[in-house]
Image (cartoon, grey):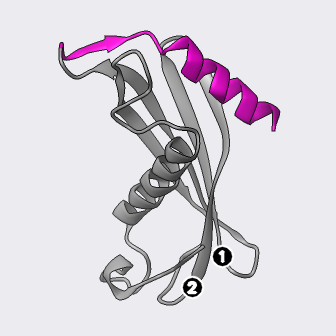
Amino acid sequence: MYKIQQEDMNIGKHVGNEKSLLFFEKVRKDWLKSHGYSELDLGEGLGMIQRSAFVEYKKQLFLENTITIEITKIEIEKLFFIFFYQIWNEKGELCIEGNTRMLAYDYQKQKVRKVPNEFIEKIKEYNRG
């Protein structure tokens, strides 16, 4: 859970568009850490890099709203792994949903690589719930 702060607000007095991606990043980092990974360590000397993001706004979020940010599923699609997110307000209303398309990345060689098998298995476990 997270309480919306002043720095999350924009000129329209609601949460700024860019904050959604930061909320997604936070929950993704937490998920990775809880499974023994980080954005720079997916195993096999690889990290991850974001290729694209999609955000859909359903309801506005305002100062001092308390939100819950969830990863609802993670899909594997060829070289991509796609995190799907939802953000709910304290009334249980879906406010934002979206996804980020990630790639396994070798930062030493500056090249996209195949997603490590161990990481794929961890994603499959997570999706089985």
Q: Residue at x 45, y 57 (%)?
A: 26
In which quarter of the view is residue 127 placed?
top right
Number of other residues with Cα within 10 Å of mark 2, as a class: few under 14, some 14 to 19, many 20 or more: some
Name the side, left or right, on which 41 lies relative to 122: left
Q: Residue at x 48, y 53 (%)?
A: 24
State which region is magenta: 109-129
Identify the residue under disc 1. Answer: 89
58 w.r.t. 64: above or below: above
Quadrant assignment for the N terminus: bottom right
Kind of residue indicated by mark 2: Asn
122 w.r.t. 117: above or below: below
Mark pair 2, 1: CA separation: 7 Å
Q: Residue at x 55, y 31 (%)?
A: 82
Residue 125 on image: x %, y %: 74, 29
Kind of residue indicated by mark 1: Asn
Q: Is residue 27 visible?
A: yes
> Which residue reaches farthest front?
36
Residue 37 on image: x %, y %: 47, 36
Which label sits on residue 65? 2
In which quarter of the view is residue 15 placed?
bottom left
Which label sits on residue 31? none
Residue 93 on image: x %, y %: 73, 72
90 w.r.t. 86: above or below: below
33 w.r.t. 27: above or below: above
Residue 73 highlighted magenta (yes or no): no
Residue 119 highlighted magenta (yes or no): yes
Residue situated in front as seen by the camera: 72 or 9: 72
Q: If you read the primary sequence from the N terminus, does the residue marked by circle 2 or circle 1 appear first?
A: 2
Q: Are marks 2 and 1 in contact (CB under 8 Å)?
A: yes
Asked which secondary structure carries label 1, the reply is loop
